[in-house]
Amino acid sequence: MPKTVFITGVAGFIGSRVAEKLLARGDKVIGIDNMNDYYPVSLKKARLERIQHPNLRFELCDIADYEKLRDTIRREPPTHVCHLAAQAGVRYSLENPFIYQKTNVEGFLNLLEIMREFEPENFVYASSSSVYGKNKKTPFSVEDNVDMPISLYAATKKTSELFAHVYHHLYGMKTTGLRFFTVYGPWGRPDMACYKFALLIMQGKPIPLFNNGDMYRDFTYIDDIVSGVLASIDTPFDYEIFNLGNSKTEKLMSFVELIEKYLGREARKDMLPMQPGDVHKTSANIDKSRKLLGFQPQTGIKEGLKHFFDWFRDYHSDMF
């Protein structure tokens, strides 16, 4: 039976792609977004334009606005929730900490309180690999202790997981948290390494390489992430947390070399010290995700970057 899925952050990178897949398979989507200017709103509008569908209802709404959020949900209570809206970015949280409290903490609590009233079948929400903080053991496992966040962003995501557990325990709400690992691909966020580096290289500007480029990331292609999100929506658990990553860590410098290859240009590199809030290495243990969600990443870094740059050349054709 078709679902009615309430998606927060539907104009975002992951949210728009999840909506697209749900609509394609016959589900209805009620999507909200506050369309903030953390990065160009034109990109968010373009994402929305490409997913227009008779079964999509879009509302301009901020999850921190309790009354408007409740009214939007009340008019058509969903069967499922996919909460992806958040103030993203580790480094930005050093500059604007209060927006993280308002959106990621207060906004998340608003949504939980409202959904307690309307009782959806499943509540899936985005967490982050950032919650692993100062953990030294790799790959990161969902069984690891995550009590040492090193950025406010990470702390707000850990708070989401704690709130979800409380609402499951007190009210029986079925909740699933997804710790995303460095998502990239077409229609991605311009503040993320792949897109950011490509723009800077094309503009002839240096790319910032923190810790002198000695960094490692578990880059995960958007379609693989979306497959995990859909599996989570379709499979209600009482309370679970999953890693969604490629489970193959890449050296940042090798990643940059691939970007240079696809652009046909050499990057100017600005070697910088470690940035506060950053971690040296991310690596996902996805054994639990494989077992319970059937999650299996399909896209390697070379193939994924080719897809990204095919889109990048088209979207930024004025640069070529």
Image (cartoon, rainbow, N blue to C red):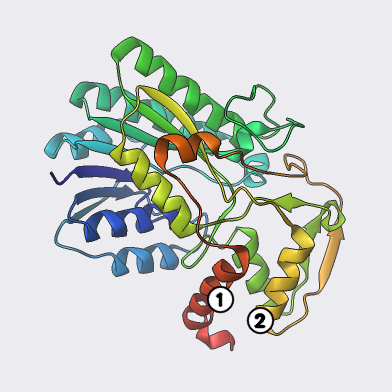
Quadrant assignment for the C terminus: bottom right
Image-based side of 104 in relation to 28, left or right: right
The quarter holding residue 74 reads: top left
Image-based side of 148 in relation to 174, left or right: right
Q: How crowded is mark 2: few (under 14 residues within 10 Å), some or many (20 or more)?
A: some
Q: Can residue 98 be seen in this view?
A: yes
- Residue 242 location in percent, x, y? 49, 34
- In the structure shown, which secondary structural element does the residue marked by tag 2 occupy? helix
Q: Can residue 64 be seen in this view?
A: no
User: What residue sits right under mark 1 in the picture?
Assistant: 309
Q: Which of marks 2 and 1 is nearer the N terminus?
A: 2
Q: In this view, does 10 lie above or below 129?
A: below
Task: Kindly give the residue lying farthest to the front in the view shown.
Answer: 291
Return the residue nearer the eye: 195 or 39: 195
What whole-number distance in Å separates the C-alpha atoms at marks 2 and 1?
8 Å
Please report the residue visible at 67 percent of the width from the left and 43 percent of the height from the top.
Answer: 283
Quadrant assignment for the N terminus: top left
Return the residue nearer the eye: 188 or 253: 253
| CB under 8 Å between discs 2 and 1 | yes
User: What residue sits right under mark 2 in the picture?
Assistant: 263
Q: In this view, does 31 lie above or below 75?
A: below
Q: Residues within 10 Å of mark 1 (few under 14, many from 20)?
A: many
Q: Give amino acid for label 2.
A: Leu
- In the structure shown, which secondary structural element does the residue marked by tag 1 occupy? helix
Please report the residue visible at 71 percent of the width from the left and 65 percent of the height from the top.
Answer: 255
